[in-house]
Structure formats: structure tokens, C-alpha cells
Amino acid sequence: MDGGIRSRLASALESAVRELGVTQVPDLELGRAKNPAHGDYASSAGLKLARELRQAPLQIASSLAGTIRIADGAATAEPAAPGYVNFRLTPEWLQQLVAQVAARGPGYGAADIGRDERLQVEFLSVNPTGPLHIGHGRGAILGDSLARILEFTGHKPEREYYVNDQNTQARLFGESVYARLHGDEPPERGYTGAYVTEIAEAARRELPGIEALPHDEAEQKLRAFAIAAMVDRIRMTVGRLGVRYDVWFQESALWKDGLPQVAIERLRESGFLKERDGALWFGSALEEEDGLGEQVLAEDEDRVVIRSNGEPTYFASDIGYLLSRFEQRHFNRVIEVWGADHHGYVSRMKSATTALGLDPDKLVIILNQMVNLKEGAAAGTGGKMSKRAGRFVTLDELIDRVGSDAVRYFYLLRSPDTTIEFDLELALAQSNENPVYYAQYAHARLFNVELTAAERHPRLREEADMSLLAQPWELDVARQLAFWPEVVEDAARLMEPHRIPYYVHDLATAVHRFYHAGNEDGAHRVVVDDPLLTRARLELCRAARHTLKTALDLIGVSAPERM
RNA sequence: GCCCCGCUAGCUCAGUGGAUAGAGCAUCUGCCUUCUAAGCAGAGGGUCGGGGGUUCGAAUCCCUCGCGGGGCGCCA
């Protein structure tokens, strides 16, 4: 409803610029002022427009500051050398904001950017052939938080896990279980972990007569059994992190529906498929004749769809999966969260999307960089984690030792673009210093204060005189509240969940300072003898607590009432 | 060789082309008889990897070099 104060200031500024006769308004760079002396927001409008208007930047800034009209007296504008327009939120407006946020409860900052857009967020989708390790946690938490943020901003996201139950790895997994069932060693490049033997034992109990079946039949049953077991385990592990899915989509279902077949047929008709060396390739060669192909596809993107032995590759499944999502289920956009090791696959999927006649911009692929194990941090020598090499720390173990909230916060504090060198020893040693507790403590403190107030002043009046919130540390909290909608908007628009925990930290800092003012001087406590003053400060507590709760919810972190 | 990501304080990391580059941890110094000290206040600590360029203005954009990570299979 309220697009946030930043967007209101931006449109007010734009109107003022138009009044100066500017028709093509450039990006005016309205953003938060770094220096408090410059107010809360600043724009370099004067500098930006100097050339077009042939006036001194400062003069333009002065005109703008003079003509701008800001609704509700939310802010004042003043020019500053060499050509800035600085905005300062007014105490009156901040006080009213506090009252509004307090009355609204959790949910302040929700936006309607998405306009009910149906989209899919597909994330994690690890081959269900082993337990999740700490690297997987990153994608799970990133995807889940992204879905939460998109939902909060008016999108209709569906969370999906794509279960590879039919590819080479799945078959190898089935063969490995089969081998263990019969007391043999797993095949070359098969799975050797103890959990494989456990699954074989479970199969022996739950699939009577499985040992007597012929190999092919047994392997198929074992594979399905084993994959189902691993999917259950994955579901439980991510469930401990508060990650949930709407759909667990099986690759095999694609083939039952004939979607890869349809996709292949369509590509064949439009000339994107060719045979070479007995295999069927997706590529540009045939299209070069009409000059279209090279625009759509790069030369080096040839990709096998059907192997020379007649087996389809995962790429065949993936193009069918595109049809499933865009044509069968009609998602407006599909957002995929991949590890950076799949980076090379991005352009091929984009090309395939185009080749199928779909809009490649509707396929949004977010890459997160790797999580490497630091030297000596676990069995093995560190580096990339590997299931086969037995060099990994399971996500379950990390959650056991550190807890879901700390794990989520730890991962979300980093932009997806940075590689994480995971040091387990350090993570365990520092788990008590995890910054998540700083934020949670702020929430618990506010909750406690409100309890105390209810005891001391059981009959407070409903109406509050917000003008009593005049202390700088009180207005600082209110100021942080004013920033929340734009943080949400940026996180959603840029698809960058890490902006949320950084905001949470800033708000928590303001809250702690506000609280601490009462320790310095009893007159500044929330709960004081004066019921009116108590009432106004309680509004601030409620507003801040609700906003903290809302923000923590978006990143899947709990907001405890006591610590 | 080609493609992607990173390089910012001792460490881990933020930072939509704007003013004096920030946070946490670590180090040092203060603050609890009174609403939760998992807190607050302060100090030290920087050639934003190097070099060019664009711009009134560059950590941010372009080029180039260096270092680190990832990818370039009829594996996924």
C-alpha cells in the first residue's frame, strides 16, 4: 500500500524535476545518506541535471528543494554543495509511522511488487543418492529464503525439488544397494557409504523376496526404494532448517507424460537436432543455413540429447522439464538456484528455452558459489567436498552442533557470489557468538519489556501521544523502521536475501541502544511512572518487535520471546 | 586456451556511479543494587589486488595484468 518512504521521496523529486522542464528524467540516484549530517536520503539531482539545464548544480538543487512537495510532511528537503538535495525525515512523520507499524502487527513491509505472479522456485535438487552435506545447506537456505521474500512481496511462489530418479547416478545408486544386498562391493564409481548398506538392510526387511528376484527387476525396485529413502532423509534434514517444499517432482514422471519426447520432436522439427556419431545432438549446425541459428545458439553448445546407445541424457529430461513448467503448469517465471559448478549449463538451458519457442528471460538462474571445506577441518585434506571420497561434513551434523537459526544466519550473511571456506572447528567454537543471537536478543528484550509494562501498568489507555517519542535513540529506531520497506523491495527485486540479515542487524542495534538508554538513566526506560510516556514507548517496542519478527521470518530464523 | 565468481581493516564479510569506505570477530579501555550485560560506549587498525581509461565524481563502469575458487564429457 505504502511503497515505502524512499519511493515516495523519489516520485516527489521526479515531479519537482519535471516542473523544471526536464522531460527525460535520468536516474537521480536517490539513496540513503551515509553521513547523518546529510540527513536520511540524498540525491545528486543537481549534478545529474546540470548539463541538460545549463545551470550550476547547486542552483538546480536549490530550486528542487524549494519546489518539491512531500506528502504528510514526511521529510524536509535542502540543497547542499556541490549539487545534492538532502532529505531528512521529520520527527512527526516518524512518530506516526511507529503508531501505524505497531497497530499493523507483523507484516509491515509487505509489498505487491509481484501482483500475484505465479512462479516456481526450484532449489537444491541434489541427486538423492546420499546425505546432504554443508555445501548443500547454502542452496537450500538461499532458495527457501528467496521464496519467502517473493511471497512477502506479492508473488505466488511454488517451491519445488526436482528428484533425479532416473539418471545415471540414480541407477548407479540402485546398483550399489543391489551389491550390498548380496554382500558384494559396489560397482565402479558407485556409492560406498555406510548408509548404502543400511538401505540394503532396510530393503531386505521391507521388500520381502527382493533377494530372489532377477537382477534387472531387483535393481529397479531397489533403486526406487533407495531413492525414496534418501528423499525422506533429505526432506527431514531441510525440514530441520525450516525449509519446506510444495512439490517433489520426479524426473521419471516427465517420461511417463512424454514431455521429453514432445520437446525432442519440437526441436527436431525446428531443426535444432542433428545426428552425429550415432547420437542425437542439440545444436546450431542445421540452423546456420538460414542465419538464425547463430543468433540463438553458440557454436560450442552442442549437447547430446540421446546417446548412441539409445539412452537419453539428463539434458533430454531437462528440456522436457521446461515444457512441464512453462507449458503444462504455466508458471510465468521459473527461478532456479544452482551451485556455481553448474555454471556451464546456464547458457545451454537458456538456448534450449529459446529453441523450444519459450522466453529465456522467464528462466532465471541464480548461482551460488561453492562451499569448500577448509584444510584439515574434516577427514581428508579439505577442498571440495565429495561423497565418493567420503570427504564431507553432513548438514545434519552441523545443525546438531550449531542449531538451525545460527546455520541459516551464517549462510545468509554472505552474498551468493562469495565462495565460503567452511571451517567446522571455527563454526563450532564461534556458534555462541553467532550474530543471530544479537538480533534475537533484541527481540526477546522488547518482548520482556512489554511484559513488564503490562504488570506495572495494567490499565494503560489505548490512545498514545506519539509526540512523546522525542529522544534521538527513539527516533533512530523509528528511522530504521522507515527503511524496512525498501530493504524488502531491494531483496525481492534483486533476489538477494542477504540484504535481510544486514537490515536485521541495523534494526537490532537501534533497539539495543534505545533499551540501553534506560540503563544509563532510569527516566529513559520504557516502563516509567508516567503512563502516557510508557504508552508511547511501548508503541515503539511493539513496532520494532513486529518488524524484527517479520524480518527474521523472511530468513527462516526464529524470534524467541525469552533468551 | 575460453567462460563465471571473488580479491575491501589482523580474520570473516557488507557496500543501487556520489560527500569523511562500514559491520561482526579479534586486540585494548570504560559501563550492571533499578525494564534481560547474548547488551552499551570508546580506541587502534585501509595504497578497496596492480596498472590504465570513461566521468564533474570510481571500491562500484570499461580495458589489461596478477592471485584464488568453479566450469568447459555420449557425468550430473
Image (cartoon, coloured by chain):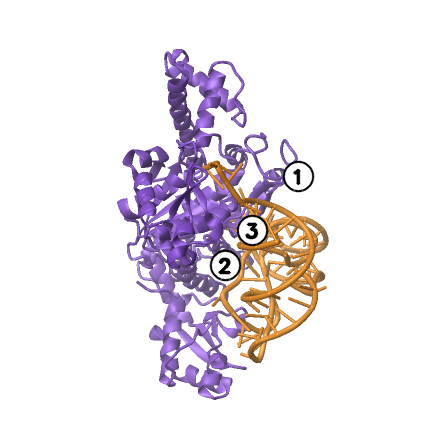
Point 43% across, 63% down: residue: A483
Q: Which residue is mark 3?
A: A418
Point 35% across, 64% down: residue: A3
Q: Position of residue A389 (x, y in %)?
A: 59, 30
**Could you give the CA–CA distance between mark 2 and mark 3, rounded to whole angstroms?**
28 Å
Chain under callout 2: A
The reply to whether the C-beta atoms of the residues labelled 2 and 3 are less than 8 Å apart is: no
On screen, B9 above or below A405? below
Q: Dot 3: what SS? A: loop
Answer with mark 1 or mark 2, whichever residue precedes in sequence. Answer: 1
Answer with mark 2 or mark 3, whichever residue precedes in sequence. Answer: 3
How packed mark 2 is, by other alpha carbons closer than 10 Å (few <14, some 14-19, many 20 or more), is many
Disc number lying in front (1 or 2): 1
Locate the N terminus of chain A by quadrant: bottom left
**Could you give the CA–CA distance between mark 1 and mark 3, rounded to whole angstroms?**
18 Å
How packed mark 3 is, by other alpha carbons closer than 10 Å (few <14, some 14-19, many 20 or more), is few
The reply to whether the C-beta atoms of the residues labelled 1 and 3 are less than 8 Å apart is: no
Chain under callout 1: A
Point 51% across, 70% down: residue: A33
Q: Which residue is mark 2?
A: A510
Q: Which residue is mark 1?
A: A375
Chain under callout 3: A
Question: Can residue A396 be seen from the camera position used here?
Answer: yes
Give me the chain that's orange: B
Answer with mark 1 or mark 3, whichever residue precedes in sequence. Answer: 1
Give me the chain that's purple: A
Left/right placement of residue B22 relative to residue A151 reads right
